[in-house]
Image (spheres, rainbow, N blue to C red):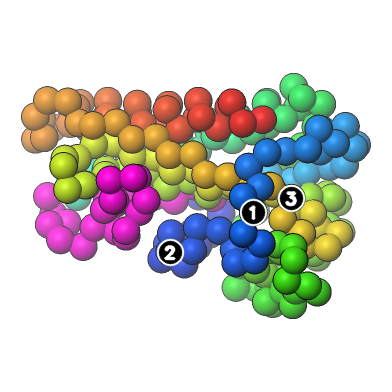
Amino acid sequence: MKTIKVIIFSSIILMLFPTGCAVKKNTLSPNFYSSGSKVGLILITNRIRTFRTEQQGFVVGLLTMNQEKYKRPLSTIEPYVNPEDQFKNLYLSLLKSKGKNITLIDTVFDEDQFNKFIKPDNNNEYFEKDIRSLKDKYQVDEVMIVEVNYGINITSTGQGGYCLAECQIINLKDNFVIYKSRSMGSVGLKGKFDTAPDYENWKTSVTSAIKKCIELEKNKY
């Protein structure tokens, strides 16, 4: 059972990162690990779905046509490929091994309960919503928000497994975004599409895409 509220998909995919500074913060300062601060992990793992992407891997949106064609494969393989525990263990074990004090915030995270953050300047990047209250509520200095989308990927050239992990780390003192990145794993379907009742080809493809995405994330910290 998911403990994290699913954030509206279109707002996340169409706006991959909050507006603000154009500089991509895809590296973490060594001070992040040695500062002694405590970070809370908020993991949002959305349900398995079918996506439509461009050649570069950017998501155009959820597939709206031929839903019935993919409904049974999705529901069949979801219990076997759900990556929530894999990503949870990845971040907790990896950051701890680096000396970072990290804890799981295992509760509902609903962006709608927070007010829009009024940026003090336009030269820096801040989280869109004012989540500074999480500092005292969970006794953490930063929050690491990771959203994972996975499932079947449809492109103009074929179909396959897909997994996208988008991460942001926010300093709760000032709502400043100190890090963000995205990792995407995509693996083409090998073999026939309809291999009911187990859909082993789809299971293999999605599992491989998740593994690929996790490996990319592992090398970033």
The part of the image, by quadrant, that contains residue 173 is: bottom right
Q: Is residue 53 visible?
A: yes
* First reached walking from the N terminus: tag 1 or tag 2: 2
| Residue 134 appears anywhere in the view | no
Gap between marks 1 and 3, in whole Å?
Answer: 11 Å
Q: Secondary structure at mark 3?
A: strand
Query: Which range is magenta?
Result: 42-69
Q: Residues within 10 Å of mark 3 (few under 14, many from 20)?
A: many
The residue under the point 80% across, 65% down is: 133
Give the residue type that dot 1 points to.
Val
Which residue does the numbered mark 1 point to in the structure image?
23
Query: Which tag is nearer the camera, tag 1 or tag 3?
Result: 1
Name the residue beneath numbered marker 2: 14
**Residue at disc 2, secondary structure:** loop
Q: For the point 65% across and 73% down, which residue is it?
A: 113
Q: Residue at x 9, y 35 (%)?
A: 194
Q: Say few, some or many: other residues with alpha carbon within 10 Å of mark 1 (under 14 / 14 to 19 / 20 or more).
A: few
Q: Position of residue 221 (x, y in %)?
A: 67, 30
Which residue is rendered at x = 56% and y = 54% of the image? 4
Residue holding disc 3: 178
